[in-house]
Each structure stands twice: as structure tokens, then as C-alpha cells.
Amino acid sequence: MNQARKKSSAEPLVESAACAGTIRIPKGCRPKQSRSTFCRLLLWATCMFFVGSAYSLGILVPRPPEAAPIEPRDAQIQIQIKNDLSVTRIHQTFYNPNPTRQEADFYFPVPRGANVTDFVLYMEGKPVRGEILEREKARDIYEQIVRRMRDPGLLEWMDSDIFRVRVFPVPPRDTQKIEIEFSAPLQAHQGTYRYRLPLRAPSRSGKGHKTAEGRLTEFRVELTSQREFGTVYSPSHEMKITRESGQRVLVEPTDKTRFDANPTFELFYDYREKDLSISLLATRREGEPGFFCALLAPPTDQHKSTSQPLDLTLIIDTSGSMAEKGKIEHAKRALNYCLSQLRPWDRFQLIRFATDVEEYGDGLQPATPASLEKAKEWVAALTARGGTNIAAALERALTPKSSSTSGTLHIVIFVTDGLPTVGETNPDRILELVDRLRDQATPKVDQTSESRRSERLRIFTFGVGHDVNTRLLDRIAERTRAASEYVQPEQDLEVPISALFDRASRPAVTNLKV
């Protein structure tokens, strides 16, 4: 990366603020009348002016932001899902209404887990393709946006990386075309796969703007697989499903003019078979070593009685902000659902935190009917008030008395809607605390392998609303090989938390190694 920066004065660079990394633009494609590099890495998030249409997944923001907004015009979206690996290609056209050339930033929310595989910028009508070089992820750009703009629409971006490109020149009173492609493996939940794509860029008011010019001219999903598809449906949009064969399905909107009714497109599908299946994708470029992607789908008819013993720790934020929009009541119902799914040989622990920390019982409790009934009474009495002491809650949950025995899966579900405001508030120190307590709280199965000490512990984090520290929650989950999720503040927490519990507590495969 340092070498790339040194060359920026002679060779234009496009750099992203996401995992996509650096895109190198060939020489000769740079405007001769400007010393500015075509695109240059600059973390700029304090003076943004967002304008998007119903179909502007990416947004083009002029610099300075006082210039007239660059308007999105057309969008074409092609999605290919082959053996549960999705490739999404988006063509966007923008219009610069200003009488002068504009320098602008192109922002695009790349879904979590996706990699940008292609980027094309049109200069004077000719496509210029960049080479994408991997680099470390950078999440702070959207955290700055959320903190400084308080834009609810940006929550769609909090579950993503931000791909950012500096664009110059955007011709006066003319169009600018941009293409971006990204790929991601799809995750299955109880045998059902979900594809999700936000369709609206955020605006300053928190809503995706719809302009008279913006329109979706193409939207097409093509599914192919070595297995036979079962149900294919979209709960978000009215779609035409065409089954060309058992292994090939086409999905298109019945009416593109009404496609903006829902800001997020979702597609679900499953397969007819129930046995373990393996899909293999292999490729090799001339003169280079080949590589492959193997996708293993475990059977979906597992019964919960066959799963390993479970130790479940539920940590719920009861700070004052949880009283807003019924969040605390939604969370209570979610806790009760998780408790109701436990078996007699499982154990559980309940912790609520605000300014202080309170625990039901003392450490892990047996999941007997009597104990569960008392625990639900304790949950019903929870109220929201006080600050947010995240560090103390995690410390209570990972103390030695909460340790699991060898062979037992320890799942922690941590729910919060705010930043740490009480006790230890430094995110890096909280992470250090998690690392230290994790090693103390998990059994040392193999004296010769330190990595096996934390194999049985998973901390799943769940962020609610716009004030959460997404980087902190993501890192806590990643350190324990778990996952993080985020929802809007008005969304019912019961459904996503219940789904997270189902997915986390009944793993078909754990500690897979290659």
C-alpha cells in the first residue's frame, strides 16, 4: 500500500474504504488538465450531502458538497446465483446538472462478507477497468457518518463495508456511468438461503429520495445449481418466477415501475434434497495456479434432541434508551423464546445491564421446568433505565463460575442498543478484557493447543438502532468465531433474535478445518 501511495502523483489510483482494497487505473486514462489523481484515498465523512433515487444503490457526492447534487438516472441490476455463490453486477448512470466539471466521491455499500470483483468507470464514453488489490478492511468511515449525521437510512450501511472512489472529472451537464460487481457466498438457515440487496441510498433525511429521472431499467436474478431447487420466493417484492429446469430458475419483477415499494430486495430459496451435499466451483487462469470453492450443505432435518449439550448466556441491555419504541418488550419476548427452547440437560444464565449489572441466580442454572419458570418471571420484571456498562456485563458473563465443561457448547447472545457510557468505555480495552476472560472461561481441552481453549465459546452480538459501536460488536463476535447482526430501532427484536438463537444453538458442523 505504501508503494501505491508513492506512485500516486504519476499514476492514478482508485482506493476504497472497504475490503475491496486498491484499484489501479492504467496510465493514460487520467485527465491532462488536472494534477488531481483520478481517485485517491481520503477518509472524508464530515460534510456529506446524500442524494439518491429509489434505485441508486451507490451514490455520487460532489466535492464541495455545496454544488448542485449529482442526480442518479438509470440503474441496471444483474444477479447470478450459482451453487449458492452470488455475483451482483450493478450499472448506474448519474447526471451532473452543474455548468462546470465536478470532482465527486462514489460511495457504495458492499454487503458484509462480499468482495468487490470488478469496477468500471466510463471516461469520455470509454470504459476504464481497474485492478483490485486486497487491503485491510476499514469501517470507521460509516461510523463517522452515523455519529455526525444521525441518518437512520445509514443503518442499511452499518451491516456493510463502504466502497469509496474519488471520481474526476464528472462532465458538466452530462452523464457519468459507473459499474461495480461484487460476489459473496450465501448462508443457509435451516436449509433456506437468503439473498439481500439494499435498493436505496441513504439521504440526509433518512429516506431514499426518488427523483423523476431515476428509474430501474433492468432487474434480473438467475439461479443455477447442481441440485434441484425447491421453493423460490421473494417476501419483499412481487416477482415472476420462471423455472426453466430443476437446476435453473429466473426471477424478474412483475412491474419495474413499482419496484421501489420496499427499500430492500430479499430472495429466499431452498433445495428438495435433505442429505449432505457438496458443490464445487473451480477455476484457473492461464499461467497461474488454480483455486476452488467448495460449498457443503449439511442436512436440515436435525432434531434438537440430537445436538450437544448447551450452555446459554443471555445478556440484555436495559439502559434507558431500550424503553423507546417498545425495544425492551420485544427483547423480553425474545429471551422467553430462547428459554423455552432449552432441554433438561442444558444450562442457562441471564444477565441484564445498564449503569449496574444484575444476574438471575449465580452463574449457569439447570434448565429444569421450575428454574425456567422463575427465570421468565425475572425477565417479566425487567425495566429500562440508566446508562450502558458493556464491559461489566461481559465480565460477569465470562467469570470462572460461568465456565462450561468440556464437550459443551457455550453460546452468549449479547443485545445492546448503545455505546459504552459507564465503566470501561475504550473499545480496545473492552476487547482485551474479552480476550482475557474468554481464555479463563473456556475449558482447556488440549494442553498443547491454546487455540482449542476457546473453541466451545461463541459470543453473538446483536445491535439495535443507530448508536451502537458496530466495530466493537463485530470484533467481539469475530474473536469468538461467532457473528453480529443489526436491526432498525423500531423493528421487532423477537423474530431476529429467535432466529439467531436457532442458528447458533443447533450447529450442524463446528470447528471445521481444511
Image (tube, rainbow, N blue to C red):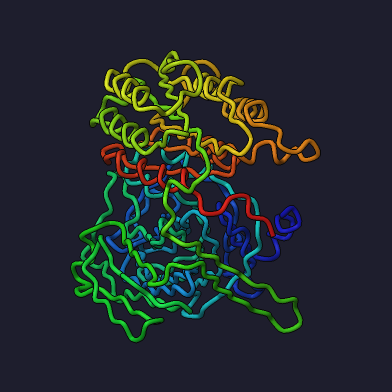
Q: Position of residue 126 (x, y in %)?
A: 50, 80
> Camera-side residue: 116 or 124?
116
**Quadrant of residue 33 in the image?**
bottom right
Q: Quadrant of the C terminus?
A: bottom right
Q: Quadrant of the N terminus?
A: bottom right
Please say if 355 is above or below 330.
above
Left or right, residue 277 beside residue 240: right
Q: Position of residue 353 (x, y in %)?
A: 42, 20
**Quadrant of residue 264 in the image?**
bottom left
Q: Position of residue 193 (x, y in %)?
A: 40, 62
> Camera-side residue: 51 or 356?
356
Please name the residue shown 62% across and 25% down the image: 433
Left or right, residue 159 beside residue 430: left
Please name the residue shown 58% across and 55% down the image: 19
Q: Position of residue 383 (x, y in %)?
A: 29, 18
Please say if 508 is above or below 466.
below
Please say if 150 is above or below 17.
above
Q: Which residue reaches farthest top?
A: 356
Please name the residue shown 48% across and 79% down the image: 226
Residue 107 appearing in the image = no
Please name the residue shown 50% across and 74% down the image: 123
